[in-house]
Amino acid sequence: MRLDRATWVLSSVSAVWGASYTVTGWGLRELDVVTFNAIRFAAAAPLLLVLAVAVEGSAAIARRWWPRLTLSAAIGIVAYQLAFSAAVALTTVTESAILIALSPFWTALLARLTGEHVRAAVLVGACVAMAGVVLVILGRGPGHAAPNRALGDLAAVAASALWGAYPVVTRPLLVDHSPLRVTAWASAIGAAVLLPAATALAPHDLSGLSGTTVVSLAFSILAVTIYGLVAWYRGVRRVGSAQTMVFMFAVPVAAAVFAVAAGTEHLTWPQIAGAGLVLAALTYSQRNPKVPDTGVGNDGYHDLDHAGTRDAHR
C-alpha cells in the first residue's frame, strides 16, 4: 500500500511532538509554564502572520468566524498548552505521555457527536495503537519520582480531553481559511492572553536565560508550533479530525526514541514491540476507504481564492 503525502507529513509532526516532551522539559527547568508558553506564542504569532501574508497575500479572517477562532485558541493554544506543560513539569514523562495519548478517543467521540464520518479502519487502528502505546510507556525503565504526580496526572487527563476537542472545534474554520492563517491568528490570540498573565504572575529577566532554555524555546516556536500546527491542520482538513488524531498514538513512541537518542533512557523489547504495533495500526488506519474522503473538499485549498480564504472580507 502506498502512503500519501499527508501520511508522511503527519508522521513527521508526531516525531517533532514526541521530541517536545524532552525538549520542553529543558525550558521548564528555568521558566514557569505560563511564561514559557507566552514567549513561545508571542514569537510564533508574528512569524506566522508574516508568512501568511507572504504566501497567501492576506491574513484576513472572515468576521463571522472570529467567535469560533477565539474558542479554538482558548482550547488548543491557551488551555491545552498550559495543561500539557504542567503535566510535563509535574508528573513523569511516562504517565503524561500515556494519558495525553488518549486524545484520539476524545476526538473520535466528539467527531461522531458532531456528525463527522469516522471510518471503521480508524477506530480499529486507534484501539491497536493504544495497545502499542501502553507497551511503549510501561516498557520504559524506572524514572524519577515526581513529587506532584497526582496533580500532574490530572493535568495530563485535562490536556488529553482538550487536545481531542481542538481539531473538532477548529475543523469548520478550515472550510474557508488555510491552516496557516488559522494557526497564525490562534497563536496571536493565545499570546494576547498569556503575555499579560505571565507578566502579572512571575516577571522574568529573559536576558539571563541559559543556552538550553533558548534551544528549548526555539524548538517549540519553530518546529512544534510553526511547522507542527500548520502541518497538523492541513491533515485535519485533508483527511478529517478523527483520522488525523490517530497519529497522536505515534507521539509517545517518538518520545521514547528521542529519550534514548538523548541518552536519558534505554529502549526495551516491550517498547520495540509496542512501536511496531503503533506503526502497523497507523498504516492500517490509512487504508484507502471505499467511502468518500472525510476531509474538507479533499484538502480544499484549490477551491480557495488567492488570499487563502473564500470569504475573508465578509
Image (cartoon, rainbow, N blue to C red):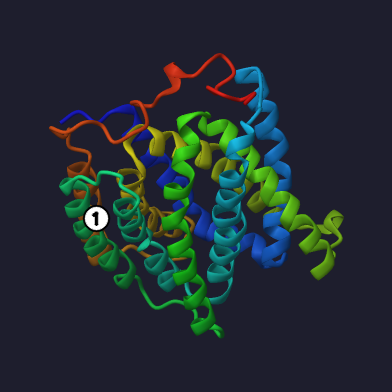
Please tell me whether residue 259 is drawn above or below residue 219 in the rendered image. below
Q: Is residue 48 left or right of residue 245?
A: right
Residue 281 is situated, as x and y percent measured from the top left of the image, at: 20, 50
Residue drawn at (58%, 38%) of the image:
65
Q: Is residue 165 left or right of residue 289?
A: right
The residue most toward the top is 306
Q: Nearer the viewer, residue 65 or 160?
A: 65
Element under label 1?
helix
Residue 292 is situated, as x and y percent measured from the top left of the image, at: 21, 31
One can see residue 202 in this view: no
Residue 122 is situated, as x and y percent measured from the top left of the image, at: 22, 48
Q: Quadrant of the N terminus?
A: top left
Which residue is identified by label 1? 126
Q: Quadrant of the C terminus?
A: top right
Residue 86 is situated, as x and y percent measured from the top left of the image, at: 58, 69
Where residue 104 sits, quadrant-wise, is bottom left
